[in-house]
Image: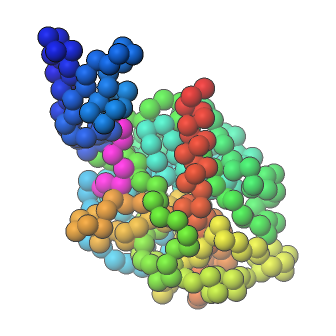
Amino acid sequence: MLFDTASSQIDTLCTCNNSFCCDLLLTDTFTCGASGAWVSMDGREALPRCQEVCGNTANEILSTGRILGGVLAELGEIPWQLAVKGRMPGGASLIGDRWALTAAHVVDNNPGFQLYGGLVNLAPSNGQPLPWDTVIIHPGFQKSVANSGRTNFDNDIALVRLASRAPLGPNLSPICLPESQGALQADLMGSVAGWGMTESKQMSQILRHAPISVYGPSTCRSTPQLSKNLPMVFTDNMFCAGYFGRDSCSRDSGGPFFVPRLGDGNQGGRGPYRIEGIVSWGPDCRQPKFKGYYTAVRNYVGWIRETIKQLENE
């Protein structure tokens, strides 16, 4: 940023790195306005600020494979993936340097949980601890219901505010929120990631990911009976997905379903990675049909942005 005191003018040249970028044009000119504020060429009264770069991965692997039916992730391949440790272990996704997104049922009645990022191995010595100070569960979620007896996972989404800014880098960076509205297209391919159960019926110590496909609403509505032979509730805030023996499973809850599919890359005009789903619920993940249910994140982008804005302005 160059100050020209003779003309009361600031010329800006913004550059980006892997973690942060300027929130304005790469170049701009600010002049001192009558109000005493710096005014950009398009009339904006705000100097440039840094904002997180989302949806990039530093170590992309061209891979396919059979979380249940998944392949091992490399460090930096899914840098937004967070581990939730505590009474209800699961996953979460970094969506900013102060914010994580997860399933409400993972953090409800789980006050002592811990967040870790920048890891693929759950060994105690691995990962960056991410202390948090606030949990905001969506107001439409039915709280204080045992997950084993729950039949309604509608609005299964929660925000976690970190106590301080996460140290972003190649192995820890946020994923982008969706930009589109409406239902996800059937047959859309994406990836799901987590530390859940594998084909050997063991919990995975290493982060895994698998490509899966979104199913149409009619397929998703044929929901199984999970709890005491009671039918599960399926709403427009959910979608289901799976693919020939691949699925999310126990301990994957709260983790991301993201597009484009890992291995397709964010090149060629496909854009950065975006989180479209949060692992929510499903039948026995070892059943042959392999159908998991996800919170549709695009339905909550307004709530996410407004909640973050309110808390950051406090």
In the image shown, does 30 or 188 lie closer to the viewer? 30
Q: Is residue 61 left or right of residue 124?
A: left
Q: In this picture, is 119 found above or below 235?
A: above
Q: Position of residue 131 (x, y in %)?
A: 53, 34
As for residue 52 lying within the magenta part, the answer is: yes
Q: In this picture, is 97 found above or below 277?
A: above
Residue at (54% x, 45% y) in the render:
305
Q: Which residues are magenta?
A: 50-57
Q: In this picture, is 314 found above or below 153?
A: above
In the image shown, does 91 or 42 lie closer to the viewer? 42
Residue found at the very far top of the displayed protein: 6
Q: Position of residue 272 (x, y in %)?
A: 33, 59
Q: In this picture, is 190 found above or below 137?
A: below
Give the main secondary structure of the magenta stretch.
loop
Residue at (41% x, 67% y) in the render:
259
> Could one spot residue 89 in this view of the protein?
no
Q: Is residue 80 left or right of residue 235?
A: left
In the image shown, does 33 or 235 lie closer to the viewer? 33
Q: Identify the image quadrant of residue 20.
A: top left
Q: Position of residue 152 (x, y in %)?
A: 77, 67
> Could one spot residue 27 in this view of the protein?
yes
Q: Quadrant of the C terminus?
A: top right
